[in-house]
Image (cartoon, rainbow, N blue to C red):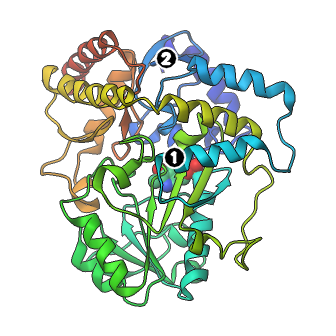
Amino acid sequence: MSMRDARSAELFERARHVLVGGVNSPVRAMRAIGRDPIFIDRAAGAYVWDVDGNAYVDYLASWGPAILGHTPPAVVEALTAALPRGTSYGAPTEREVRFAEAVRDAVPSLERLRMTSSGSEAVMGALRLARAATGREPIVKTIGGYHGAIDGLLAEAGSGATTLGVPTSPGVPAGATAATRLVPYNDLAAAEVALAGAAAIIIEPVAGNMGVVPPAAGYLAGLRAACDRTGALLILDEVITGFRIARGGAQELYGVTGDLVCYGKIIGGGLPVGAFGGRAAIMAELAPEGPCYQAGTLSGNPLATAAGLAVLAALCTPQVYEDLESGGAALEAAFDDAGVSVRINRVGSMLTPFFAPAPVTDYASATASDTARYGSFARALLAGGVYPPPSQFEAWFVSSAHSDEDLARTTAALAQAEQTSAA
Ligand SMILES: *Cc1c(COP(=O)(O)O)cnc(C)c1O
């Protein structure tokens, strides 16, 4: 830690005595890039400021939610208006109805929605519902796919076409992953085999949690067809991609329709939120209409729906997605202009620069990248006023608030980081 991080270092020292590892979510600790965490004081537009007063062009975007940049006026106004009316009632509100209508307006296949307080809970609900609706237990999951810190999906071990799920984390009972079948991402043949007798396959339509890995041509359509053949449900985890890569998410961009779709991150405008939905006939299995139980004290929270509605309204203008695409393209070009030799995977405003020896198409090729190199590069970037995700295996997000000037500043910082970290 240098002088520029004095206050962060002080807070981290205190934090370690009261929070596990000094943080409330592991990757924030920045161990993956070999340094201590930076404590944030505030954020606005494309920037975050740390407690030592350093400014950073932010590409973490709170891991995805900040698609309009931080504290967009529409969200601040919506929250300010909602706050004095109460923070939670445990009873229905008009705003939840408008929220669900706004989501369905963007994604017509979502005939019914259920809101939750996080993406993890949305996935949990979708899995339970898929099992209830099909009367089957096995769930197919891609290796390197992340769907929240859920027992049944904390499995990734093994290689080959299909391996039986083995828990990745101690504390996950073997029984919890016994019905989890693992297949490599982008391997349609493996998925087709694994889908026999399965309740569902859950997939990030664009992988974001092994770094960004786009679906191969025909992969998602192939999964759709395989699900139709086997009677398994296609669960699209659009917690990152929903409303980011298009207003209708991956379903719109790739022309694929999920039976159940999970959301989080962007739709809460930075407040804790998640949601899942699908056809009315499937969703009717869910309580109170059906026997499949799912509930949450703060689900459909008045502040989360206020912030979420403001974001969804802003995303109704096609111009936003043009800006996000050109911002993503500009960030990709910035690496090139700065002379950084990386392999970039990008879909719209989400991208990952891999320090990898070969094209990255799945977890195996992603994990072949040089993580030590990413670590030194990321540390140099932070020192130069650019905030990248603190791990090679995460997405960088450009927001609609990133200006040409912010991107020019990024290019300069990338070039500087390449010089100081390459040695
Ligand atoms: C972040 C994420 C989740 C979990 O959402 P939380 O709000 O962190 O619980 C699930 N799926 C994907 C694809 C994610 O990126």
Image x and y of residue 316, in percent: 46, 33
How many tags in the picture? 2
The C terminus lies in quadrant: top left
**Residue under the image location 39 percent in, 27 percent down:** 320
Q: Residue at x 50, y 43 (%)?
A: 27
Q: Residue at x 62, y 49 (%)?
A: 100
Whether residue 340 can be seen here: yes
Type of amino acid at the residue the image marks with label 2: Gly
Disc 1 packing (10 Å; few <14; some 14–19; many ≥20): some
Picture coordinates of residue 386, whole percent (x, y)? 38, 20
CA gap, disc 2 and disc 1: 27 Å
For marks 2 and 1 on the same chain, the one whose residue lies earlier in the sequence = 2
Which mark lies nearer to you, 2 or 1? Answer: 1
- Residue 252: % across, % down: 35, 51
Determine which residue is flagged by label 1.
105
Please tell me which residue is depicted at 33% across the width and 34% down the height of the picture. Answer: 349
Task: Answer few, some or many: residues within 10 Å of disc 2's Cα (few below 14, many 20 plus, some between 14 and 19).
Answer: many
Q: Which residue is mark 2?
A: 45
